[in-house]
Image (spheres, rainbow, N blue to C red):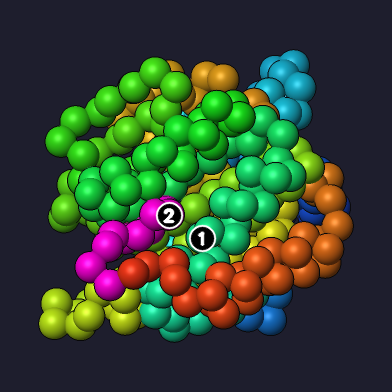
Amino acid sequence: MTNSDLSIGDVAERTGVPIATLRMWESRHEFPTPTRLPSGHRRYSEADCELIERVAADREAGYSLPSAIERARATAAEPEPSIYAALRRRRGDLMPYLLPKSTLMAISHAIEDECSARAVRPIMFGAFQRERFYRHAEKRWREFAHEADLAVVFADFPKRQDPPGAPIELPVERSEPMAREWALVCDGADYSACLSARERAGQDDVEDASRLFEALWSVEGSVVREGSRLALALAARAAPELADGVAKRLSESASGTGNTVAMATALTNRIVAYVGDGRLMPEGEPPASAGA
């Protein structure tokens, strides 16, 4: 048995926390966050056991359950270096698709439009790979930032910048996994959606609009919340204070984000409209949305 092959029964035996309690914690607080096999079965790691034991100890010391979980998350190991890889590993039930950049543009615009129209004070993250792509989308994202509780963008910026009335710009080294990733997260109380993708290697000679990405997207609250936590952990490496205002909010369950069927239908309609329009990325121009 490897350190990521522990069943919920194994975890209960090792930590002393009953199975029913572990399931309640996950249902109400999305903690712990086990890996999901394609069958939907949970699998835990030794690190998960350590966090569970830490929460149990804090509960005995008098902390409330939400406070104990927040403390455990804040003291966890180094953040995941890749949003896409972490979501794929933790949510084996998600189906990735191989999509060209032009299709990711349609999905990104659709998520942005739905977020702008429906989300109230969302938390937003965008990964653009290159600064030049973000600059083309900056005006649009400045509008998002005015309506968001927090807006952060990642790209190969030369340094961190906090321009007034705009998203916080955080640099990503080209050697980091995030330099190959495309991400968009809109996490609101009444609307949430996320897109996460990783560029296939060996595409230097491929036309920009045809570059291929392994991608997944979802409007399921727990998936989006997981994406938010992953992005915030990455952001907190360079700017720890960013977690102060939203960490408690992201520690809570995301189960009340609305009718996922209706949200998925509305988002899909927008995606189809953008794909059918075919004018998102004229030849020679960079994209005006999150991603590369």
Badge 2: how crowded within 10 Å, few (<14), some, or many (20+)? many
Residue type at mark 1 is Ser
Which residue shows up at 37% across the image and 40% down it? 138
In the rendered image, the quadrant that contains the C terminus is bottom left
- The residue stretch that appears in magenta: 283-292
Q: Nearer the viewer, residue 275 or 47?
A: 275
- Observer-nearest residue: 184 or 143? 143
Q: Which residue is mark 1?
A: 108
Relative horizontal placement of residue 38, taking residue 278 as reference (left or right): right
Q: Position of residue 44 (x, y in %)?
A: 58, 60
Q: Nearer the viewer, residue 277 or 184?
A: 277
Residue 167 visible in the current orientation: yes
Neighbor class of circle 1 (other Cα within 10 Å; few <14, some 14-19, many 20+) is many
Please report whichever mark, 1 or 2, sits nearer to the chain's N-terminal start. 1
Residue 119, percent across and down?
A: 70, 41
Residue under numbered circle 2: 289
Question: What residue type is disc 2 on?
Answer: Ser
Helix, strand or loop status at disc 2: loop
Of helix, strand and loop, which one carries label 1? helix
